[in-house]
Image (spheres, rainbow, N blue to C red):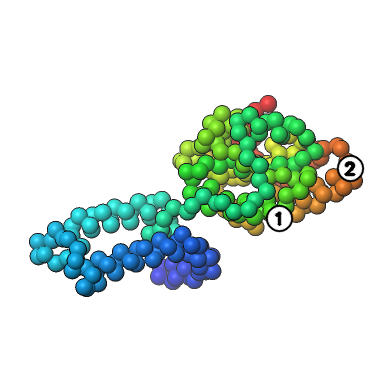
C-alpha cells in the first residue's frame, strides 16, 4: 500500500503535470540540464574539460561538483515540491494580454470609492512570489473573460506598497502564505477574500485555479448581474453581497479597517 499510493497519485496528476511541463521556460530548463549532463559525461566532449579529480578522469564529477549539485537540489526541493525530480528555472513575469488596472498606495482607495456601482476583484501580489507569478496568467485570463463596465479587475503590488498591505491586512511574510490574496469589493467595501486567514494570521490552504476562483467568487453571476445593472441604467449599488454566509471571512482577520 505504501508503494501503490505514490503511484496512484502520480498517475492522477499526469494531465496537470504535462500542462505544467509544456511551458517554454520549463522545457528550456530541462534541455539545458540535459545538455550539461551530455557535455559533462559524454566522450569525447568531456575529455576537453578540466578536472580536479585525483585519477585525472574528466568524465566523472569531482567532489566540489557533487557538493554543488546536492546543495542546488535541496534548495529546489524546499522551494518547490513539484521540482523534486526536475530542476527548473523560476517562471518569468507574465506579459500577455489582460484587462487589469494596476493600483498604487493612493489610487486603490480612490478607485474603490469613485463609483460604488462597480464591483472590483483586486489581487494583492508581490513580484518575488512564485505563487503570484504562477497565478498571473490565470488571473489575466479571467479578466479577459469577465471584465465589463460593472465588473473590473485590479492588482496592487504589496511588496512595493507596504502601506496597502497594512491597510488591507495582507501579510507579505512568506511564512503566512497570504500571497496572492484576492479580495472582492462591492459598494467600495470588502465582501470576501481568498485565502481566508485563521486566528494565527496564517492563510487557510486554498488552490488558486481558474475553476476555484469562478466558483468561490460567483463570477458568472457577478458578470450577468453587472451587465444587467448597467444595461438598465440602475445607479443604485448592490447592497447584498454575492457570496453567502458559507464563504464569509472569519471576524477580525480580514476586514478592512474603517
Q: Residue furthest bottom?
A: 43
Picture residue at 29% right of the left edge, 69% below the top:
38
Q: Residue 180, relative to residue 163: is it above or below?
A: below
Residue 240 coordinates in the image, percent (x, y): 80, 40
Picture quadrant of residue 7: bottom left
Q: Residue furthest front?
A: 48
Q: Identify the residue under disc 2.
A: 233
Image position of 137 (left or right of 216): left
Quadrant where the N terminus sits is bottom left
Q: Is residue 245 visible?
A: no
Picture quadrant of residue 117: top right
User: Foreground residue, 4 or 86?
Assistant: 86
Secondary structure beneath label 1: helix
How packed mark 2 is, by other alpha carbons closer than 10 Å (few <14, some 14-19, many 20 or more), is few
Q: Identify the residue under disc 1.
A: 145
Give the mark, 1 or 2, whose residue is nearer the N terminus: 1
Question: How much space separates mark 1 and mark 2, taking CA atoms?
Answer: 22 Å
Picture residue at 60% right of the left edge, 38% below the top:
156
Secondary structure beneath label 2: loop
Q: Is residue 257 visible?
A: yes
Q: Residue 110, relative to residue 223: is it above or below?
A: above
Residue 4 coordinates in the image, percent (x, y): 44, 71
User: Foreground residue, 160 or 215?
Assistant: 160
Picture residue at 47% right of the left edge, 43% below the top:
128
Q: Residue 192, relative to residue 143: is it above or below?
A: above
Residue 223 coordinates in the image, percent (x, y): 77, 51
Q: Residue furthest left?
A: 54
Image position of 18 (left or right of 256): left
User: Foreground residue, 56 or 227?
Assistant: 56
Quadrant where the C terminus sits is top right
Residue 73 coordinates in the image, percent (x, y): 33, 56
Image position of 220 (left or right of 169): right
Amino acid at each position: 500500500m505504501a508503494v501503490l499510493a505514490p503511484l496512484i497519485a502520480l498517475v492522477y496528476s499526469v494531465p496537470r503535470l504535462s500542462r505544467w511541463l509544456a511551458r517554454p521556460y520549463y522545457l528550456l530548463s530541462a534541455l539545458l540540464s540535459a545538455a550539461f549532463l551530455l557535455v559533462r559525461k559524454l566522450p569525447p566532449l568531456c575529455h576537453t574539460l578540466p578536472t580536479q579529480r585525483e585519477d585525472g578522469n574528466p568524465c566523472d564529477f569531482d567532489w566540489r561538483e557533487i557538493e554543488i549539485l546536492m546543495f542546488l537540489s535541496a534548495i529546489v526541493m524546499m522551494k518547490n515540491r513539484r521540482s523534486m525530480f526536475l530542476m527548473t528555472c523560476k517562471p518569468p513575469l507574465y506579459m500577455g494580454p489582460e484587462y487589469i488596472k494596476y493600483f498604487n498606495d493612493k489610487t486603490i482607495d480612490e478607485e474603490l470609492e469613485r463609483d460604488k456601482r462597480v464591483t472590483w476583484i483586486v489581487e494583492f501580489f508581490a513580484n518575488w512570489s512564485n505563487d503570484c507569478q504562477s497565478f498571473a496568467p490565470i488571473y489575466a485570463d479571467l479578466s479577459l473573460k469577465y471584465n465589463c463596465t460593472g465588473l473590473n479587475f485590479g492588482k496592487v503590488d504589496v511588496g512595493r506598497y507596504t502601506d496597502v498591505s497594512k491597510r488591507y491586512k495582507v501579510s507579505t511574510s512568506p511564512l503566512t502564505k497570504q500571497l496572492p490574496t484576492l479580495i472582492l469589493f462591492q459598494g467600495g467595501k470588502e465582501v470576501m477574500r481568498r485565502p481566508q486567514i485563521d486566528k494565527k494570521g496564517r492563510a487557510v490552504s486554498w488552490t488558486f485555479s481558474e475553476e476555484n476562483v469562478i466558483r468561490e467568487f460567483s463570477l458568472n453571476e457577478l458578470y450577468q448581474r453587472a451587465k444587467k445593472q448597467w444595461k438598465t441604467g440602475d445607479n443604485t449599488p448592490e447592497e447584498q453581497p454575492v457570496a453567502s454566509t458559507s464563504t464569509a471571512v472569519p471576524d477580525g482577520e480580514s476586514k478592512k479597517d474603517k
